[in-house]
Amino acid sequence: MTSVSASPPSAEPAAQPFDRLRYAGVFLLLFLFGAETFLVSPLLPTIADSIRVSEAAAASSVTAYVLVYAVAAPFLGLLSDRFGRRRTLVAGTLLFVLSNAAAALSTGLTPLVLSRAVAGLAAAAAGPAIWAHIAETAPDAVRGRALGLGMALFSAGQVVGVPLGGFLAGLAGWRSAFWALAVGTAAAVPLLLKQVPAGGSAAPADGRGSAVRAVLAGWADPALRRALLVNTVFHAANLGAYTFLGAVLVQRFDLSVEALGLVGVLVGAGSVVGSLLGGRLGDRARAAGRDGVPLLPLWGLLLAAGIGLAVGGPGIVLALLGVTVWFLASGGFVTDQQTLAGTVAPELRATSSAWLTSTMYAGTGVGAWAVGAFADVAVGTAVVGIGLALVAAVGARVLRAR
């Protein structure tokens, strides 16, 4: 991968300050999208009872959201690259409002699942457009910091989503959680119209079949292809192992459900700190003239260390420290990857960002399957998590070297 040249570090950051308010609308959306990720989990028993289905059946609404997002994101990312950020972002945001209102009004499983699928479609349209918008409008010297703050807010939303969903359900019923998302998202629309400029297409349409070729174009670029492969492996270790973290901690320390909830706070705190730290350190490295993905190998090594401590560290204190390090590495890695996706192929920023999400979900599925193949989940988490984290670190080192 080619090096990114920059001015001396003493001058550039001061010359190009980071105006956070300029991104208030998209930052609000990222927080709400993060909250959406885990909002339904604490509500499943209540929803299942309300619409008279099993909890397993109600959980299909979560699956619908994730699957639609993972499949649709690259194609909708292309729309953003072709027709501009503003159109795709506003359309996705309005669809997100409608889908959450539809979920709140659902009286049966079918309309609930359909509304969650539409919500996944909406997030798949808006999400890649948000990351591309930040990457192409933030000054070079603070691009990583801007993306890192966006990722930190997304992570904060994920942490807040679980207690927020439970609180609203207890206060006014499970439907109120979806109404709150709809209202909060609607509040972001005026900010988006003011802050996201209208823009034309970046990637030209060049004939029949060009849309499919454009969706796959990220895989044709050597640097992006390697980055996407590293992303898949990293998240097979990261989120694949995380699928079984609760079971491992219960097995090791006999933790209660309440204690596991507190572990979730450490997960969120680590992700927020890692996102902010990754953006800031990445900007400093690039300002010093080092390459555009300076810390990816470090995040892989830290992930391996964090998983190792969480699974095998002596005592609960070291295990919880491992969880924090684990997700600090996760937040830093994702921020670095979004920065890379926004700079390597500027004409396909949203498409590349969408592929990061799709490969993240793919890696998560493969990693969870691999860990689940072990009779002892603690052993599986250690072998798969640590092993693949080290593979990701080596792959990231190769990515830097090219």
Image: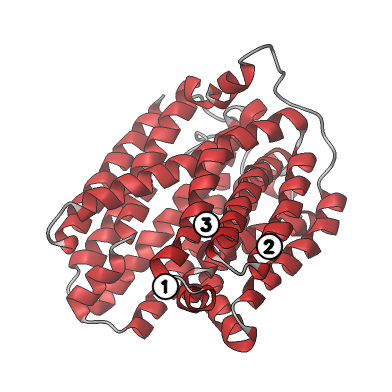
Side of 400 where 82 appears, left or right? right
Picture coordinates of residue 398, whole percent (x, y) = 35, 30
Disc 2 designates what residue? 102
Give whichever of discs 2 and 1 has the lower sequence position.
Answer: 2
Instruction: Specify the quadrant of the image occupied by residue 23.
Output: bottom right
Disc 3 element: helix
Residue depicted at 30% across the width and 70% down the height: 246
Q: Give me the C-alpha separation between circle 3 and circle 2.
A: 33 Å
Disc 1 designates what residue? 264
Q: Give me the C-alpha separation between circle 2 and circle 1.
A: 29 Å
Q: Along the line of sight, which residue is nearer the eye, 144 or 207?
A: 207
Disc 1 element: helix
Residues marked 2 and 1 touching at CB (< 8 Å): no
Residue depicted at 17% across the width and 73% down the height: 314
For label 3, the crowd category at 10 Å Cα-Cα, with few meaning under 14, some 14 to 19 and many 20 or more, is many
Q: Along the line of sight, which residue is nearer the eye, 340 or 9?
A: 340
Q: Along the line of sight, which residue is nearer the eye, 255 or 334?
A: 255
Disc 3 designates what residue? 275
The residue positioned farthest toward the top in the image shown: 207
Picture coordinates of residue 194, whole percent (x, y) = 87, 52
Give whichever of discs 3 and 1 has the lower sequence position.
Answer: 1
Residue depicted at 71% across the width and 17% down the height: 205
For label 2, the crowd category at 10 Å Cα-Cα, with few meaning under 14, some 14 to 19 and many 20 or more, is many
Colour mode of the rendering: secondary structure
Q: What amino acid is at disc 2?
A: Ala
Residue 86 in the image: above or below residue 40: above
Residue 78 in the image: above or below residue 207: below
